[in-house]
Amino acid sequence: MVGLDSDTREMILESLNDFAARHLPFDYLLELDKNGEFPEEILRKMYDPEILGLHLVLMPEEYGGFGG
């Protein structure tokens, strides 16, 4: 997250932690790891602006992202 100020980084990390707590319980992650899987559904949720909007972190500011 190069180029982001500390408040923005902190907000993003808190959002990721909240997302993980709600959608990625530890037992579920262990099962995925054991099976060598990572469901596409999780990525869709991470990129959904209504849920997390992770893609906005990587998108340049001139296109509405955070510019990270």
Image (cartoon, rainbow, N blue to C red):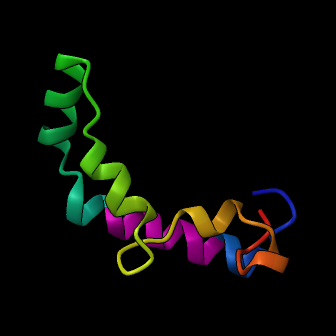
**Magenta region, mostly helix, strand or loop?**
helix
Q: Position of residue 30 (x, y in %)?
A: 19, 30
Quadrant (top left, top right, bottom left, bottom right) of the C terminus: bottom right
**Residue 65 forms part of the magenta stretch:** no
In the image, taking residue 66 as reference, residue 42 lies left or right, namely left
Using residue 42 as the reference point, say whether residue 63 is left or right of it: right
What residue is shown at x 46% (from left), y 72% (from top)? 15
How far from the left and from the top, in percent, is residue 41?
25, 50
Residue 54 image offset from top left, x and y in percent: 53, 63
Return the residue nearer the eye: 53 or 11: 53
Q: Which x, y percent locates residue 17?
A: 40, 63
Residue at 26% across, 62% down:
21
Instruction: Say which quarter of the image contains residue 11.
Output: bottom right
Q: Residue at x 48, y 72 (%)?
A: 14
> How many numbered marks have been drawn onto this rendered protein structure?
0
Camera-side residue: 12 or 38? 38
Magenta span of residues: 10-19
Q: Residue at x 23, y 52 (%)?
A: 24
Figure check: 30 above or below 13: above
The outermost residue toward the front is 63
